[in-house]
Amino acid sequence: MVKLSEVNSKLLKAHYAVRGKIVIRAQELEEQGKKIIYCNIGNPQALKQKPITFIRQVLSLLEYPALMDKPGAEKLFPADVIRRARMILEKNPSGTGAYTQSAGIPFIRKAIAEFIEKRDGIPADPNRIMLTEGASKGVHTVFTLLTNKENDGYLIPIPQYPLYSAAIELYGARQVNYFLDEKNRWSLDEAELERSIEGAKKSGINPVAITVINPGNPTGAVLSRKNIGMVIRFAKKHGLAIIADEVYQDNVYGEGLEFVSFAKVMHDLGEKDVTLFSLHSVSKGFLGECGHRGGYLEIRNMPDDVYAEVIKLLSIGLCANVDGQLVTYLMTAPPRPGEESYELYAAEKAAILGDLKEKAGILGKGLNEIEGMQVDVPEGAMYAFVKFDLPHPKGINPEAMTAEERHKYEAARDAKYCLRLLEGTGICVVPGSGFGQHPGTLHFRTTFLPPKEDILALVEKMKKFHASYVAKLQEA
């Protein structure tokens, strides 16, 4: 029997906060009959978001093509859905149950290149695009490629999505934190990046890449073109590759804001020496097709011999699941104006994004009215990273602690707060320590994906809980 002491030490060190102990406790409480408002993970369809009709109609026909030949099929499915399904089967006649090329089905890679060209107004090469099992698999591909020595390091934002810190542990690399500027709507600061990388080098770390999440998870911030250009110049100066996590590119709500890709800015700058890995996924945006595990990785500025190693790596895993590849295709090649499905598709898309924008406003405004809580109204993505204040117990002076002692103290405090919040109200959020936070601060991450009535209830429950929790600490 395998003992815990025999398990890979890298796996033991890895942590993934969004499905950690608090979520396990939430599931236990739910089994006991307690209503839980799950705000811990970006899983839209688990929180009552309906699938996009066009996506599911095309998939239905591709999984069971005989439906197209049944009497009355033209009444069940719009004509363009049937045409699209027949076209896909012509280009991929082996159907959904056979392996594909390791990098993905060629016509889908071509469609993704056309999607990028239309989005950014720049050329894209289908032969530098690969289909992945969600963006997460793309991240693992990049880490496998780039991690060569034990002192190789990755700059990651703090706060970050814990996929990155967990992957760093799994691959035996070194985590290099750079703090986002909370006082300036979570923007990136060049001086902070320089501080981070110089500190890493002095510690014997060899930085190989910088990760940027835009729009931000967990912050909900949207980076400006100027900020992106600064990161590209910084990466070139220090010989870093860039991992651009852009899975929330459709989720932009702030007035006057727009998503700008790293590929677009890099092309406009004429930069050809910095390798760029861009990630996208069907799990987010307005599709919310998390369970289909689809996505793509686009690579720019990579020599052919290195790219051949990426393809070899993909071939070891055979290929991404075919349904996920097909959903990725449908995301990047949706119905066009004039086609039978277009109006419904456009209406469903607008309704989902409009609802998310409204709920972001409700959550941000409501939580900011709670004494001792602060949050920027999310400008993008699906999350808010909420700062909250708690009094310290008598006799406790955090300033006198070592950095390690303070980290453990604060992690215990925000974890306990979130656990008591769950048990008292049924609201399941994730402690800020699971994402990283500036020393001396406490946060939690919440989604605004649940139905509007649940978001309204969340705000009211949070007001009462926080006041009661703080009062009890003051009494103690």
Image: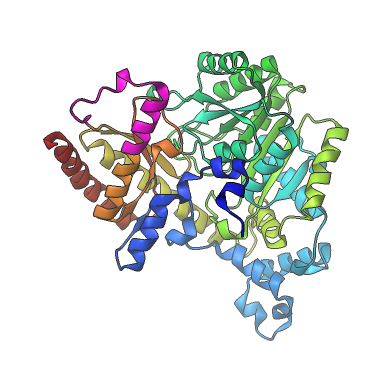
Residue at the limit of the structure toward the right, as seen here: 305
Q: Residue 164 at what x, y percent from top left?
A: 57, 38
Front-most of residues 432 and 174: 174
Q: Residue 321 at what x, y percent from top left?
A: 71, 59
Quarter of the rendering occupied by the N terminus: bottom right
The answer to whether residue 330 shows anywhere in this view is: yes
Front-most of residues 239 and 248: 239
Q: Is residue 210 left or right of residue 442?
A: right
Give above or below for 132 relative to 254: below
Q: Residue 401 at what x, y percent from top left?
A: 34, 21
Residue at the limit of the structure toward the bottom, as seen here: 71
Residue 87 lies in the magenta stretch: no
Which residue is pictured at 70% across the width and 84% down the height? 70
Q: Is residue 73 left or right of residue 384?
A: right
Q: Residue 377 at what x, y percent from top left?
A: 36, 36
- The residues colored magenta run 391-413
Front-most of residues 32 and 119: 32
The answer to whether residue 289 shows anywhere in this view is: no
Indicate the quadrant where residue 318 lies.
Answer: bottom right
Q: Is residue 195 left or right of residue 272?
A: left
